[in-house]
Structures are given as structure tokens and as C-alpha cells.
Image (cartoon, helix red, strand yellow):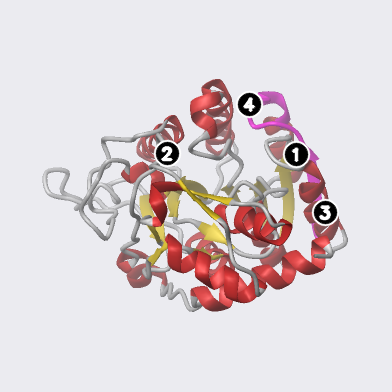
Amino acid sequence: MRILVTGTAGFIGFHLARALLARGDEVLGFDNVNDYYDPRLKEARLAQLHARTGFDFVRASLEDRDAVEDAFVRFRPDRVVNLAAQAGVRYSIENPRAYIDSNIVGFLNILEACRHHRIGHLVYASSSSVYGANTKLPFSVDDEVDHPVSLYAATKKSNELMAHTYSHLYGLPTTGLRFFTVYGPWGRPDMALFLFTRNILAGRPIDVFNHGHHRRDFTYIDDIVEGVVRALDRVPAADPDYDFGNGSPAASSAPYRLYNIGSDRPVELMTYIRLIEECLGREADCNLLPLQPGDVPDSHADVEALRRDVGYAPTTPVEVGIRRFVEWFREYYGD
């Protein structure tokens, strides 16, 4: 297939593009390669993709409506995976307008292009952050998510609502994927595993929020990509028998679905840190801090719906995933 993947200079987008190319799909990447974190890492990811047959690339922002339209006209994609977004819970407190531009205006441009070019399936990134103040664990797509605690989470919830509108009005098949704490090689420098590894190797203290009592559903990148590909290949169908009075918010009479993608095996943050220490052969100097504004203390993905519909089964233990990341980090940075 011809698949447009936005956010291909990013962590998940890079790994997804590699997987799609490996199975023979043609991929058009779309990314503005911004400086939210080190653009050199993004350029290194892109260099690997450019070395592969079947990959082309557009350097532009989602909020650039003309650039989005031109990409659709030129490439004529069969399906679209929208992973580009302004990421980060904490940064959304510092720079809220970036989230409206990319995550709301940009997503509208993607929806409009998919609508007018009759795209067969739009898969888009949501986030576990949408569960916000929910306290019932594990988090289920059957739960309401009406109390976000960060603007980032609010934009992702908005994406889900916007997608449903287009599925309902125009019959556009859409699937939203709520990612849970993705980690692995080529990961984001603003995420805990990267920050902890870099600081421990440099002999610097690490900031451990909520005094290390977080529990996170850390999900290895290969498991995430498997889930995305399986969801992409399963186009949701309309359900004329859907009951709006009693149905799940993750489904609809429209061709619309929502899924969690997580490991279904939450790990306490201090346990995570101990595993990093074991892989590095060094101890961390932990600076214990209170819970950050916008953060949630625990996350745990109920992935039964994705397991039922596409056969998704996360297989990578956190011990293995951390070791693979540390090996990549040391090779890439020469530490």
C-alpha cells in the first residue's frame, strides 16, 4: 500500500516507517523536524529511512494546510497514520499554543485531506494521558475520559472527538490509539529512560517525581509498532446496530474505533530505575520530588479490545526492553 506517515522523524513514526517499508509498503514521511528535542537525533532517524527503497519525505508542519494538501495530491496515499503532534505533558504548561497549532489545527488539516481524498483508513495517535483524573485501574477504552489534567491530554481527547465527527459525517474509517509510555532504542530524549540513562552515565542526579511511587505501563517500541500495523490493516466498519444509550465510547455506529496500546504490565518507577542501574552497572543519585502538575500517579492499559479485534499481544519484558535501549544508547553516543 501507499501509506502517508506523519511524524516520521519522531520516535514511533521512525520505527513504524521502517516496519512498513520492510513489508513492502511505500511510505511518504511528513515532519517539520522541530527543535522540541535535539534535531540531530531526528535527522539521524531520517537518514536511515532515506537509505531504504520506497521512502520519500516532506519537511513541513501539519498546520501548513497547503503543504498537507500537496502531499496528498502528489503521493495519493491509500491509508494515513498521523503520529505528528506536539508531545509532552509538562511542556504543554509552558507553551500551550504549540499544542493547539499542531494537535488541533494540524489534525483538522489531516482530517480534511483524508475526507476529500477518500482515504481508506486513518489511524492516529491518541495518548494514555486522556484518562487524566480517572482512578479506576486498569484504564479501559470503555471508560469515560472527561477530566484531563493537562492541555496535551485535552488535545488528544479532542482528536478523538474530531475523528468521530468525520467518521459519522463522511464515513471516514478512523482508529485512535492510546499509547502508554513508549520506550526503546532511538527513543525521545525528554522521556524518563533516556534522561535517567544519560544522567547516570554522566554522574549527575536524576529527578524522580512522586518520590518514585509512579506505576507506569512501560511499553516497548516493537510491541507498539506491531499494534499500530495490526490496527492499520483492520479497517473499522459501520455498525448500524450500535446502541448509543448503552454502547462503549470506543465504538460507534460510524466506522470509528479506539484502542489502548500498552504492555498490560505496570512497573513501579523505582523498579524501572533499578533495572537501568543493573544494565549500566552504576547506581543512580535520586533527587526525590513531588508529583508534577499534569502528571498522573499510575497508568495501566486494559488491552483486551485490541487483543480481541487484531490479536495484539505485547511480548517484550521490561528487563529486555531496557537492556536493548541501553545497548543502543551506548553504541549511538559512544558511552
Q: Mark 2 or mark 4: which is in front?
A: 2
Q: Relative to residue 63, is residue 128 depicted above or below?
A: below
Q: What residue type is labelled 4?
A: Glu
Badge 3, how many Cα within 10 Å: few under 14, some, many 20+?
Answer: few
- Residue to which mark 2 is pinned: 292
C-alpha span from label 4 to label 3: 24 Å
The structure residue drawn at horizontal position 42% and vertical position 38%, both measured from the top left corner, is 292
Q: Give the x, y percent position of residue 304.
A: 31, 68
- Residue to which mark 3 is pinned: 44
Q: Give the x, y percent position of residue 203.
A: 69, 57
Residue 33's label in the rendered image is 1
Q: Return the residue nearer the eye: 193 or 35.
A: 193
- Tell me if 16 is positioned left or right of 243 in this view: right
C-alpha span from label 2 to label 3: 31 Å
Q: Which amino acid does label 1 sit on?
A: Val
Secondary element at image label 4: loop
> Is residue 60 inside the magenta stretch?
yes
Q: Mark 2 or mark 1: which is in front?
A: 2
